[in-house]
Amino acid sequence: MSGNISSNVGERKVLIFPAMTPTVGNNQIYFLFSIRQVEDIIQEINICPVPFAPSYTEGLGWWREQTLPVISLEACLGLEIKSSRKDPRFMLIRSAAQLQIGLESGQPAGSVGAMRSIIKVHRSIRLSTLPIKCAPVEAPWIPNREFVRGAYEWDEGFLIVTDINTIFN
């Protein structure tokens, strides 16, 4: 029973960070990830560029003896990228589908061949608890909507929930 309680608590925690994009109107864009999707937050990583990779792939990064793609969520969604004066952080994200497979098999989350990628994130990452007071929006300003699970308006701007499984595939 305690396993279920901690699992439910984890599902209610999310990480929110601003996108490295210009504002839409006067609203900042933010990305939202479940805490269960985030495997690690990395201060610094060396990125090796990969010729002929998709435009949203910044290159390959090395994490715990694994080579992983480093992607830009902003570029993936087709958004204009605003360079940040601050050095970014990096977040290791795992596929939600792989998380479910691990949980169904009784394995710890992330231990069953999880698909992973490193994303560049703004340094101001914050932890929040659901529910967050927000309302769904159409977000026509996102060119590549196939990579978005949901777009919401909240007090601080727009929250974007990306479809990591589609991005990974």
Image (cartoon, rainbow, N blue to C red):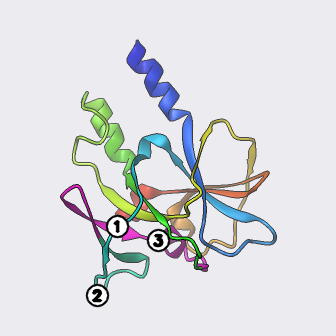
Residue type at the position of mark 3: Ser
Q: In this view, does 62 lie above or below 34?
A: below
Q: Nearer the viewer, residue 76 or 136?
A: 76
Q: Are marks 2 and 1 in contact (CB under 8 Å)?
A: no
- Which residue of the protein is positioned furthest toward the bottom in this rendering? 51
**In terms of image quadrants, where is residue 86?**
bottom right
- Sequence-wise, the earlier of marks 3 and 2 is 2
Look at mark 1 in the image and give the residue it sits on. 45
SS for dot 1: loop
Residue type at the position of mark 2: Pro
Tell me, for residue 72, which label it has, or none: 3
Q: Which of 128 and 154 is in front in this view?
A: 128
Q: What residue lies at 24% left-to-right and 31% top-to-bottom?
A: 107
Q: Nearer the viewer, mark 3 or mark 1?
A: 1
Label 2: few (<14), some (14–19) or many (≥20) C-alpha neighbours in 10 Å:
few
Q: Is residue 87 above or below residue 111?
A: below
Q: Which of marks 2 and 1 is in front?
A: 1
Q: What residue lies at 55% left-to-right and 77% top-to-bottom?
A: 78
Is residue 80 shown left or right of residue 57? right
